[in-house]
Image (cartoon, helix red, strand yellow):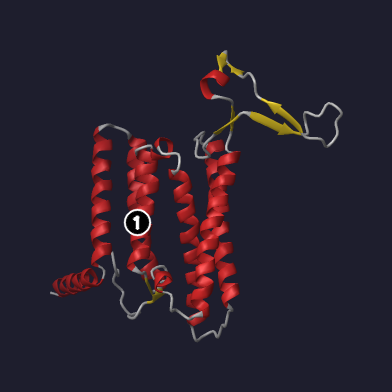
Amino acid sequence: MKSKDKKERFILRLREQYKAHKKTFIAYFILRFLVITALILQLFNKNYENVFLCVLTLVLFTLPSFAKKQFRIELPDALEIIVYLFIFAAEILGELHSFYTIFSFWDTMLHTINGFLCAAIGFSTVDLLNRRQRPSVSLSPFYMAMAAFCFSMTIGVLWEFFEFGADILLHTDMQKDAIISQINSVTLDPDGLNKVVHLPIESVAVNGNDWLAAYGGYIDIGLYDTMKDLFVNFIGAVVFSFIGFFYVRTRGKGKFVQNFIPTPAENTNTDESEGI
């Protein structure tokens, strides 16, 4: 009997959550259905690496719900939907369907969004702390913006460390290569001085293959990709930090920022999973 009542309460709470966050529910279940479909197809194809990728995506989909329950917060629908779309775009479209190589802008776009979202998360963390009555904390808008910016850039750097580690230890290619046609180096100075030598690449042969004819130059391993990723992460972090600064200055009048700022949950006594 108790089990039946608990089930009914759960269904009732689920219906309430659906009415309050209808768009989020729809987006979540559509994306989850697509991932499960991809997982089944990869199982039939015996591509177990992609199966693991699909399982990882399903696990990542639980993070917003975990954050809401663990930290007793409410996520705006826009933020939660963007997080789901970001995970799907990065893992399923980017890795599984090779969007990273098909579309040259895909990785840049996702890193820019990542910088923006991480700044929003960092800003939200500080903002929630700033709203608490105990302990008493009063942080300036500039400090909150800087904290959000630094949080976003730290996440970006840690991710590049992860990519580098995976490429070295697991022999992956997460740090995508770039073709270079000129070398600028002081190492090539015949006098051994700190003078830059500009050397155009006119011929490249690797294992008997003419890379200049095939690729147009020599392959830079990861450096250009890493710096580009950090730069676009920087842009995303600056944009949100700038918006967040004026949001705090006007104390919440900006409707756009409210779509990315979690708020304390109204009911902090529930022990059931809230949201999706």
Residue 197 placement: quadrant: top right
Q: Does residue 185 sit above or below 57 in this rendering?
A: above
Disc 1 on helix, strand or loop? helix
Left or right? Give the position of 218 relative to 102.
Answer: right
Please tell me which residue is depicted at 17% across the width and 70% down the height of the picture.
11
Q: Residue at x 26, y 58 (%)?
A: 27
- Residue under the image location 22 percent in, 68 percent down: 18
Mark 1 surroundings within 10 Å by alpha-carbon count, few (fewer than 14), some (14 through 19), many (20 or more): many
Residue 265 is at least partly visible in this image: yes
**Frontmost residue, 197 versus 233:** 197
Identified by mark 1, the residue type is Tyr
Horizontal arrangement in the rendering, residue 57 relative to residue 229 (left or right): left
- Residue at which label 1 appears: 84
- The answer to whether residue 2 is left or right of residue 190 is left
Indicate the position of residue 198 as horizontal and vertical percent values: 73, 30
The answer to whether residue 158 of the structure is visible from this angle is: no
Task: Report the front residue among 209 and 268.
Answer: 209
Q: Position of residue 167 (x, y in %)?
A: 53, 37
Frontmost residue, 60 versus 146: 146
At horizontal 59% and vertical 45% (from top left) the residue drawn is 227
Which x, y percent locates residue 147? 58, 68
Q: Where 166 sits versus 74, above or below?
A: above
Judge whether 111 appears above or below 74 on screen. Answer: above
Q: Classify the position of the N terminus by image quarter.
A: bottom left
